[in-house]
Image (spheres, rainbow, N blue to C red):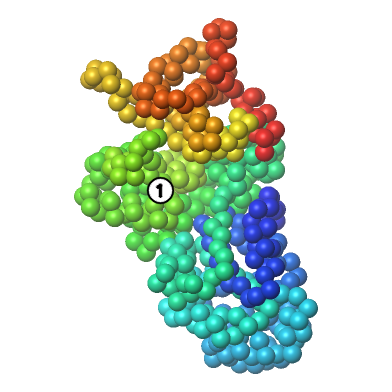
Amino acid sequence: MSQQKFVNRVEEIEILEEACSSKEASLFIIYGRRRVGKTELISKFIGNRGVYFLATAEGDRENINNFKVSVSKFLGDESIIKANFDDWHSLFSVLASSSSFQAKASKSKIIIAIDEFPYLIEANKAIPSVFQKIYDTILRQLNVMLILSGSSISIMENEVLSYRSPLYGRRTGQLQLKPLKFRYLAEFVDYGFEDLCRTYFVFGGIPEYLLKIDPDVGFWENVSKKLLSKGSALYEEGEFLLRTEFREPRNYMLILRSISYGNHTLGEICTYSGLDKSMVSKYLDVLMSLGLVIPEKPFGASEKFKRRLYWISDPYLKFWFRYILPHKSEIESSHNGSVLESIKADFPTFAGEKFENLMKELIMDGILGRSFSTVSRWWGRNGTGKKGNDIEEIDIVAYSESRRELLFAECKWTNSPVPTSVVKDLKAKSETLRKQYPGINYTYAVFSKSGFRGEYKEIVNDTILMDLSDIQRGVYTNS
């Protein structure tokens, strides 16, 4: 489905154009989760320079027949439609030898994009080998760019990109399409900055989700109509996404629901789910490989650090598992109003976590006027030995190797102004890390939804205080 709106993707278009500019044939792989905008990107890139074909689950015969129609229209050659092909290789053989194809290719590179390539693989496990042969024996000698695209990340990574795939070593480039960054949300909906933040916390940067927002009504009304209403696309979307990746999604859903409720350690997830440790570890590995769950270790910890935390990476999925799935019975009974009120009551906690994630993204994007090598969270013992009071947490620790700078930051999504004394607390909490990194320049920042109260003169010049209006200026000044 076309998004009917194309926002940003400048870097991605440049990558594709560079691949297309090669004098030799190219095989380019594009993948990414559903609704992220692959179809629109590919269509925008191709223009009138080639063929875009959307594969279906109908099997080789139907896909071959549909593909030859698309190619025939592009070439203006009806003989291709009239021909019968038993397999993909014979189709491409005839196509490459046709005078219409050769005439087009002599003038400029022809782009052939097959979207949802995993559907072909599911219907015929030999498809990767088939297209390897097509590329090696036919397309490699032609002025052609072949794009294979898919939304099933597991199939694309295992059957197309993996070293075990027959296509391994043939690809000349690949691109995993990511959600849009926060600064582009204003192109979808004309909200105030606070509601833009809330929108990002719930809908994320998935273009197809953002396009479903009604710009003429407020944030909470959109939540009610687009997420909590039977028949709305986003009401069932969470389960649909998982069923496209897993044949038996039950245990995966159980683990994701556990994480959405605040169970982030392996032990907590095991306790909630009732699954044993080895099974949970296996499922987490799969979820991480698909990018649905991200592991977290504290800043400075080695790769061998075992007590990692696990988080749902996608804002919409986090919202769906936390608020929609547990309330489906009420929503099905048309008690949307009470569900919405319960969400509003809990939302500050949900938003607090997402606000931290947003500020990490913005710091990496240079909202403070400078870049950092890494941005992460930190937690650990403070060395006091006081049981129950010896664990410290810092929302954000950012490091710049080139400047030898450590930034310590706190994020506060509260309805009340934050006392400036929070800076003193932040400096005290950072002492443990400062001891581990002598000779480093230290700076501090506090990001607050509702501003600050207290004596600003107590804040020395190594500290940055930003409320939402300051963050807004930073986003659009440094973007």
Local packing at callout 1 (Cα closer than 10 Å; few below 14, some 14-19, many 20+) is some
Q: Residue at x 40, y 56 (%)?
A: 289
Q: Is residue 179 above or below residue 375?
A: below
User: x, y percentage for residue 223?
Assistant: 55, 40
Residue lying at 59% horizontally and 85% vertically, measured from the top left? 138
- Amino acid type at mark 1: Val
Residue indicated by mark 1: 293
- What residue is drawn where x is 36% and y is 27%? 436
The local secondary structure at tag 1 comes to: strand
Q: Is residue 133 above or below residue 168?
A: below
Count of marks, rendered view? 1
Q: Image height check: is 199 above or below 12?
A: above
Can you give x and y, in whole percent of width and height, for residue 300 in the image? 38, 35
Task: State whether residue 61 appears in this view.
Answer: no
In the picture, the quarter occupied by the N terminus is bottom right
Identify which residue, 289 or 346, lies in the foreground: 289
